[in-house]
Image (cartoon, rainbow, N blue to C red):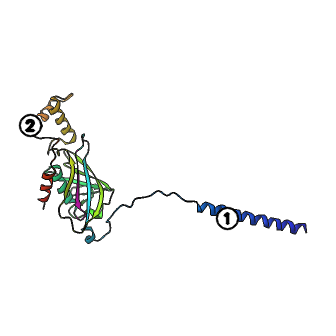
Amino acid sequence: TDTIIIGEKTSLIRMLQDLLFVKIFDDTISLPVKRKRIRDKKSVRGKSPEIAKNTYYQIKITLKSLSPPIWRRFRVSGNITFHRLHKIIQVLMGWFDYHLFEFEVNSELFGIPDEDDVYDTRDARRFKLYKYLEEGDTFNYRYDFGDGWECKLKVEKVGFSEEEMKTAICLRGKRNGPPEDIGGPYGYSDILDYIKYGALEEVSDEMLEFLMEKVEQLEGFDPVYFNLEEINSELKKLR
């Protein structure tokens, strides 16, 4: 009899333990969970070309290694090639497409492939923005590998419109784009300092001769000048 009573007590205890566990478990999973809100990134990757035609990208481009910064905010169709984007950047910065260029997007390079190119460069004339870029992405643009201009680009917004965007539009910007063949960001900075202060410390005779030559080249050049209407007028001329 004692054995039966003990067995019944044991079973009752186990039942109570099981009920308690279920109660605790239910209370645990019923607690409200605070989840971090993640903003959806607008993307047209994988979409059809017809949908891509009605998208636009708002991009900010900033020249690296310069202070005060030189930047432009502009909009382009998502259906253009990286080569077309290169042409647009040339207008935005006041350059004349004298030199080679490349884009770096997620470790992939886009430019004009060369037979002797040791890198796997994709042909920028064949690949379009909408296949590789989405809202929030950043990527790099390099121009004139001798002077070494490098720009950071950020896709600030991906939008949709009723009609295809035929012409790029510059929205805002600051300061004049540096002239071609001026010595890159550091040479350009030294030249502006020389113009401003009349002398530079620890400059070799060879460098001083270079600076003087470039100072003459910059006669009449205003580094803070920026004219939105002029830029948009030139963008409309792009073919």
Which element type, helix, strand or loop, lies under badge 2? helix
Report if residue 77 lies within the magenta region: yes
Vertical side of 1 occupied by 235: above or below: above
Indicate left or right for 17 with 198 as reference.
right
In front: 114, or 20?
Answer: 20
Secondary structure predominantly adopted by residues drawn in magenta: strand
In front: 194, or 106?
Answer: 194
Residue hosting label 1: 22
In front: 149, or 26?
Answer: 26
Query: Residue 30: percent from the left, percent from the top?
Result: 59, 62
Query: Residue 37: percent from the left, percent from the top?
Result: 44, 58
Residue drawn at point x = 14 percent, y = 35 percent: 211
Indicate left or right for 136 with 93 as reference.
right
Q: Which residues are magenta?
A: 70-79
Nearest-to-viewer mark from 2 and 1: 1
| Count of marks overlaid on the render | 2
As drawn, the label of residue 216 is 2
Vertical side of 214 occupied by 54: above or below: below
Residue drawn at point x = 14 percent, y = 52 percent: 229
